[in-house]
Amino acid sequence: MSMLDILEQIPIGFLEADATHLCDILQKPTLIHLEGRRKEPLFVSILLHGNEITGLHALQALLKKYEQQELPRSLSIFVGNIYAAEHGQRHLPDQPDYNRVWPGGEAPTSPETDMMQSVVNEMQQRNVFASIDVHNNTGINPHYACVNVLDDRFFHLATLFSRTVVYFTKPTGVQSSAFAKLCPAVTIECGKVGQQYADNHAMEFIDAALHLSEIPTHGFPEHDIDLFHTIAIVKVPIDASFSFDEKNTDICFDDDLDYMNFRELEKGTRMGRLCGSQSQRLEAWDNQGRDVGDDIFSYEHQEITIRKPVMPSMLTLNENVIRQDCLCYLMERYKIG
Ligand SMILES: [Zn+2]
């Protein structure tokens, strides 16, 4: 039996529902097709991570705006992990991460990988126009868009949201990477949850994308974009204990780490110190799957410092996110053209 429901209208109660109560309105993860003036649909996915609710709020506001008027373009909405949303979690302990199971990824076949494949197939048949995947993060970060290919059409779409754009190829199995095979596709990172400004920003971006008659295929001006390339994912080893509050754990991070996001850190910048066994080391996995942690971090006198200039993103103080995802990503500036 399919994990996915497909609807052709907005379900009753959807526009008012709290993320924790979507399970009362939807039976399953649900793809909703709504018709608009231009036929090729804009695809928007929300709640791939159940605790990241800005996308739901943005779509609720957008659909209310169009209750009495025609959508400028058809809109297909995928409401993802409603089960985790009920509990305010990224994903439940027995579930895969819903943004690591899309076609092209390395996740083992599961009901979730089958579901994402059917969503992609369905949108391919409908000749999808562009794709937007809406996320939040937990540390202090600017709003930014992510792309998985270097292509002027993608830059045009991404910079409608923010001039800060991150290009990444790892992790795999993400929504925007699967849709990049079909149309311009971006992930938008809308900062922390619970900010009205973020809900409005995401809503205005989706509305702007709905109004595009086409996406220019060339000539993106370099001075209109701050483009960064993710070069490594930093993880805490599974068997290492860590904290932000000076408990006697293997790794004691400084408690203001997330202020470093999107800052160019100089050599010698401190991130914390080794306590406990003093033998644990941070992992930094590069795009070739090698651990280059020892090239990046130094542990002299038990102090964890940066060995060479880097720029982190998504540094977080949230211990669950660090365990389920990572401590941060490391980036470098990227020149286009
Ligand atoms: Zn997310």
Image (spheres, rainbow, N blue to C red):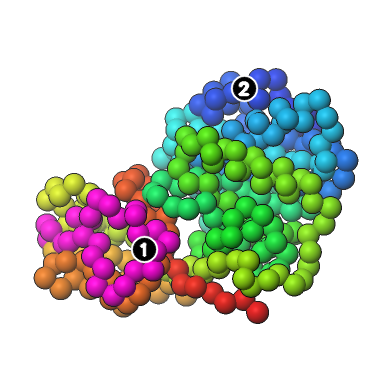
Tell me the amino acid under the disc marked 1. Val
Residue 217 position in % (x across, y down):
78, 67
Q: Is residue 49 magenta?
A: no
Identify the secondary structure beneath mark 1.
strand
Q: Are marks 1 and 2 in contact (CB under 8 Å)?
A: no
Please say if 50 is above or below 255.
above
Q: Which residue is mark 1?
A: 234
Residue 84 visible in this rendered orientation of the protein? no
User: Magenta segment range?
Assistant: 252-277
Tell me the CA gap for discs 1 and 2.
Answer: 38 Å
Disc 1 versus disc 2: nearer the observer = 2
Q: Residue at x 27, y 52 (%)?
A: 256
Left or right position of 297 against 129? left
Q: Provide residue 115's location: percent of width, then percent of height.
A: 65, 44
Q: Amino acid at mark 2?
A: Glu
Q: Nearer the viewer, residue 299 or 324?
A: 299
Q: Which residue is mark 2?
A: 16
The numbered disc on residue 12 is none
> Is residue 97 visible in this depiction of the protein?
yes
* Residue 177 figure quarter: bottom right
SS for dot 2: loop
